[in-house]
Image (spheres, rainbow, N blue to C red):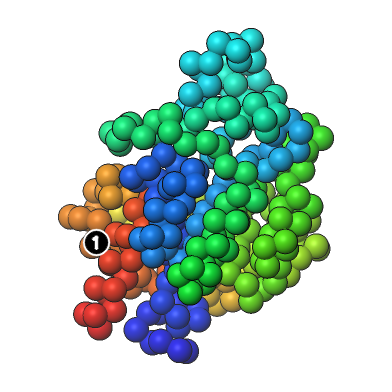
Amino acid sequence: MTNSIFPTLSGEPPIVIAHRGASGVLPEHTLAGYARAIEMGADYIEPDLVITKDGHLVARHDRYLSTTTDVATRPEFADRKIEKLGHDGADWFIEDFTLAEIKTLRAVQPRAGRSTEFDGLYEIPTFDEILDLITTQAKTLGRRIGVYPETKHPSIFTGLGLRHDDALLSSLSKYGFDGADDPVFIQSFEMENLERLNAKTNIRLILLTEKRPDFKRAAKTVDGIGPSKKLLLTDTHEDTGFIAAAHAAGLAVHPWTFRDDALDPKFPDIDTEIKAYYALGVDGIFSDFPDTALSARQTYKDLK
């Protein structure tokens, strides 16, 4: 144990992961949003990765583009709006666009109640552009900045003849992220995808989940669990034992998602909410407002 103040698996302070960048203040998955998160001091930047028609990894939370881009205002793409199995209604889908076409779109704020003043300003970044930003900023600031990519819908993309794995690992390696000691985690909701990656890399892997997993079984493939935070505390603020069971299996726990503007009603304010999870022993948290999570980590530490 290197720091007994925090009851984490390693004893180190929990990491703060900028969820889709500083997505609480700028449009998600933009270089500007990632840069703002780095400026705030985030330990890790989280890009969700989808794949273009011509095989490029780009950052979007979903395959469909209507909620996070201005594609609906582009008459040149009107005929791309179609219905697909598994999606409610017609939309524009990333796999029907080349990277050059995606680069003509601009990001918009998808979450109600957040500022739209930055809509239309920022491009959709590629994974390589994100990694270039992170590594450049790490050198400039003289500190490690981690990356925490998620493979979005890997089984769907595989069925389309597109696959994250090799392109993802190649890009990470090119920028110096290729081992268990490097500041990188790869996350997915799909264990099959994580098993493929586990056979190809020593990079740490995280299973995302909305239900309690078989920890011992998961530990054969992954290094940690990314659970919905609802799995860790009951409605009466009681510890469910999730973290203790995960730690007993040697697994880190990184719950999602903490938002200043979507407070869990069990708590009076976001600072209290976040510190309650730090006290449980989480090893990291995903936050749309990384400066808030960092401030709560510091005050938690100062009070001990």
257 vs 223, left or right, is left
Across the whole image, how many numbered discs are drawn on residues?
1
Kindly identify the residue that appears in the image at 70 percent across and 72 percent down. 179
Q: Is residue 17 visible?
A: yes
Q: Residues within 10 Å of mark 1 (few under 14, many from 20)?
A: some
Secondary structure found at label 1: helix
The part of the image, by quadrant, that contains residue 17 is bottom left
Is 92 in front, or is 83? 92
265 vs 257, left or right, is left
Query: Residue 170 in the image: x percent, y percent?
Result: 76, 57
Q: Residue furthest front?
A: 140
Kindly identify the residue that appears in the image at 43 percent across and 33 percent down. 121
Query: Residue 203 in the image: x percent, y percent?
Result: 68, 67
Is 164 in front, or is 143? 143
Kindly identify the residue that appears in the image at 76 percent across and 65 percent down. 201
Tell me: residue 88, above or below residue 12. above
Q: Is residue 152 visible?
A: no
Query: Residue 232 in the image: x percent, y percent?
Result: 41, 61
Identify the amino acid type marked 1: Asp
Is 254 in front, or is 35? 35
Tell me: residue 78, above or below residue 213. above
Kindly identify the residue that appears in the image at 57 percent across and 42 percent down. 125
User: Which residue is tagged 1?
Assistant: 271
Q: Residue furthest bottom?
A: 1
Tell me: residue 108, above or below residue 31. above
